[in-house]
């Protein structure tokens, strides 16, 4: 049988199960990445497993999210992660080095391998022809310990690319076109696999920008073939030995097929406040822009920044526009400097920042009240910028620079001929710290804000829980567990961060859930989309939430709920969603036995009615739920 690229990698890494979409499989994980916002908890979890060293080909701990050091907390976390890396055999990337996905693609990604990262944009490295997936920190900690990663075997969505991008149309426009067609739910259960004659026209950074934002489609991963351009990229990074070709067999079948003629795409923009609210840039000429930011893991490499620099050459920003440049990596910044791009950026009036996530995760760069912000980021969920009622538009660097010059959203094709970006200068300002040969004597340095991982009890047989909150469709993990400069420093302190659960939607939530515990939350479709942050599962659990009921769940969030022993139940009957209200009491009899028996449905009594709720869970998931979470389960098995 001819196989897709995804199937080839899955087959080569199967630890349990067979390639059959929907069935549970376990995959051997070759590489892991963590970043500081999720990595502190992952490190605490790894420590709790009691191993002396990681058991992967390579594991890297990046510091890129929590860069503001307004007090000791983030600085303590950085130091803690550096010491953990040395102790347990991880590479360490210090603050200022750049964003995990950009750095991993440059320095470690290799075709044919598997990568598990505690960040939802880990599929960025799918641009290299690897199966790169986002997961909760606990799954990544388990992978670091050599455990396979359990997931539901994905279907494969093929995207046949033909033609070539026109001038001023970029990789971002390809993925925005996918979001326009398929929506933020369209990729659920799929690996998105790109193929066809258009592939060779895209460079590695472009491929990675496309696979990166496959996360916004809800996809498990996205993947490109590995070809001669992949080899050339690796060669330039001094890693040609990591090259291995990858492509689908001729005649491989896809579960769903899309076709994109690259030459027909035009510059696109996602409007506030969802990455799939996509329209042509040309239609938004009436939208004034106050702030423009070029950066984030999706669009911050050498070519992106150089395109902006060259387009700005000899020009000035429109009056009143603030343009920020957030390089994705120290390497990209050094390359732009070597190619003499910095002068144009600075002379035009741009603000130059250190390499990192910065405003993408609300760590500074919040827009002014009532203003419009245009960003080359992957996400524009409401309030994520740090400003309530923000209006954030998403685009590629081409639209960003055209708009910064015009003062309103602009089609970049009006800028005239596309400037030719010179080949990337061969500068590689290495600042990655390899693990020492022997780390067992390294002292792990903890600050006062780093709280131990909380104890979680096993699931009771009888459970009566009260609905503490009811929410709508497409609730993101940014709604459940906000980020931003106030909250992110608490990522290594679960009791403290739990005070902010649902804070923007309902500031009383934390107190109410704690008073009602055990509590439940009711949600609509695609509940928990977005970030991989496991705090969105663990912090509510810490407050006493034992059950979540939703019309459907996003993949990573559902896995995180199970990892912390929160039962995810599907409301198949829309009338049940309507019936449940804040304050409704759900009584489950024999819940634990029902879950362990493999039953696909459980019943809850609500007043004098019985609701039938679906539990989509593998046998292993059920054991985790019964044990009160993965950590309890692994500890019991050791
Ligand atoms: C994000 O883009 O939302 C983040 C911040 O990178 C998250 C991880 C986190 O919440 O720490 C992600 O995408 O997984
Ligand atoms: Fe960082 Fe933003 Fe990328 Fe998340 S989406 S990894 S916050 S740059």
Image: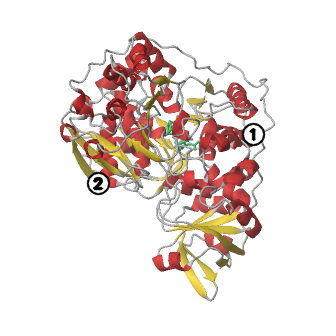
Q: In which quadrant of the rendered view does residue 431 lie?
A: top right
Residue 193 shows up from this direction:
no
For disc 1, does the CB lie below 8 Å from ligand 1?
A: no
Q: Secondary structure at mark 1?
A: loop
CB contact under 8 Å: marks 1 and 2: no
Mark in the foreground, 1 or 2: 2
Apparent side of residue 226 relative to residue 524 in the rendered image (left or right)? left
State the separation of the CA atoms marked 1 and 2: 43 Å
Residue 108 pos. (x, y %): 49, 26
Residue that label 2 marks: 256
Between 468 and 80, which is closer to the camera in this rendering?
Answer: 468
Apparent side of residue 20 relative to residue 56 in the rendered image (left or right)? left
Q: Compared with residue 64, is residue 271 higher up or lower down, i.e. above or below?
A: below
Residue 608 shows up from this direction:
yes
Residue that label 1 marks: 50
Residue that lies at the very extreme toward the front in this rendered image? 319
Q: Compared with residue 546, is residue 302 higher up or lower down, i.e. above or below?
A: above
Label at residue 533: none
Q: In which quadrant of the rendered view does residue 449 lie?
A: top right
Q: Compared with residue 513, is residue 462 higher up or lower down, i.e. above or below?
A: below
Between 113 and 345, which is closer to the camera in this rendering?
Answer: 345
> Measuring 62% from the left and 39% from the top, which residue is drawn there?
37
Q: Secondary structure at mark 2?
A: strand
For disc 2, does the CB lie below 8 Å from ligand 1?
A: no
Residue 178 pos. (x, y %): 31, 47
> Measuring 45% from the left and 20% from the top, which residue is drawn there?
332
Between 29 and 443, which is closer to the camera in this rendering?
Answer: 443
> Measuring 26% from the left and 34% from the top, which residue is drawn there?
169
Apparent side of residue 311 relative to residue 580 in the rendered image (left or right)? left
């Amino acid at each position: 049988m001819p196989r897709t690229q995804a199937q080839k990698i899955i087959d080569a890494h199967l630890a349990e199960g067979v390639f059959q979409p929907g069935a549970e499989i376990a995959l051997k994980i070759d590489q892991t990445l963590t970043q500081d916002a999720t990595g502190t908890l992952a490190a605490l979890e790894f420590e709790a497993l009691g191993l002396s060293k990681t058991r992967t080909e390579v594991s890297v701990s990046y510091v890129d999210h929590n860069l503001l050091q307004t007090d000791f907390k983030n600085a303590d976390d950085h130091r803690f992660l550096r010491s953990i890396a040395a102790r347990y055999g991880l590479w360490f990337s210090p603050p200022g080095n750049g964003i995990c996905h950009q750095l991993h693609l440059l320095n470690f990604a290799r075709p044919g391998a598997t990568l598990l990262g505690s960040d939802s944009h880990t599929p960025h490295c799918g641009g290299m022809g690897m199966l790169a997936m986002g997961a909760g920190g606990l799954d990544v900690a388990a992978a670091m310990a050599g455990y396979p990663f359990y997931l539901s075997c994905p279907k494969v969505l093929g995207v046949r690319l033909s033609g070539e991008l026109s001038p001023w149309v970029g990789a971002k426009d390809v993925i925005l076109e996918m979001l326009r067609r398929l929506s933020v739910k369209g990729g659920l259960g799929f690996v998105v696999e790109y193929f066809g004659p258009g592939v060779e026209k895209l460079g590695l950074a472009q491929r990675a920008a496309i696979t990166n934002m496959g996360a916004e489609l809800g996809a498990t991963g996205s993947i490109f073939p590995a070809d001669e351009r992949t080899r050339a990229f690796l060669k330039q990074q001094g890693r040609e030995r990591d090259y291995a070709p990858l492509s689908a067999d001729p005649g491989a079948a896809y579960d769903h097929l899309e076709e994109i003629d690259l030459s027909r795409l035009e510059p696109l923009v996602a409007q506030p406040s969802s990455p799939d609210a996509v329209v042509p840039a040309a239609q938004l000429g009436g939208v004034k822009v106050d702030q423009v930011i070029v950066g984030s893991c999706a669009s911050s490499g050498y070519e992106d920044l150089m395109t902006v620099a060259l387009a700005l050459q000899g020009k000035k920003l429109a009056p009143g526009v603030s343009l920020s440049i957030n390089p994705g990596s120290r390497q990209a910044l050094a390359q732009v400097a070597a190619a003499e791009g910095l002068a144009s950026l600075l002379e035009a009036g741009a603000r130059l920042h250190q390499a990192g996530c910065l405003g993408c995760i609300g760590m500074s760069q919040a827009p002014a009240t009532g203003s419009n912000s245009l960003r080359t980021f992957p996400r524009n969920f409401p309030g994520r910028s740090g400003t309530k009622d923000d209006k954030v538009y998403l685009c590629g660097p081409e639209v960003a620079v055209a708009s910064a010059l015009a003062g309103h959203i602009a089609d970049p094709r009006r800028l005239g001929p596309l400037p030719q970006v010179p080949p990337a200068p061969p500068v590689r300002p290495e600042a990655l710290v390899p693990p020492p040969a022997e780390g067992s004597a390294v002292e792990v340095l903890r600050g006062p804000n780093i709280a131990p991982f909380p104890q979680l009890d096993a699931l009771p047989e009888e459970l009566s829980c009260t609905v503490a909150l009811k929410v709508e469709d497409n609730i993101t993990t940014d709604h459940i567990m906000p980020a931003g400069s106030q909250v992110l420093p608490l990522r290594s302190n679960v009791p403290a961060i739990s005070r902010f659960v649902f804070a923007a939607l309902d500031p009383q939530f934390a107190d109410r859930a704690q008073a009602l515990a055990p509590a439940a939350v009711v949600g609509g479709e695609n509940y928990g989309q977005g970030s991989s942050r496991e705090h969105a599962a663990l912090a509510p659990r810490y407050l006493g939430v034992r059950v979540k009921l939703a019309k459907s769940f996003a993949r990573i969030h559902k896995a995180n709920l199970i990892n912390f022993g929160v039962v995810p139940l599907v409301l198949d009957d829309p009338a049940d969603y309507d019936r449940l209200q804040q304050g409704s009491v759900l009584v489950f009899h024999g819940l634990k036995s029902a879950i362990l028996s493999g039953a696909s449905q459980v019943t809850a009594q609500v007043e004098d009615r019985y609701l039938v709720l679906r539990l989509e869970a593998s046998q292993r998931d059920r054991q985790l739920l019964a044990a009160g979470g993965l950590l309890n389960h692994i500890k019991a098995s050791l």
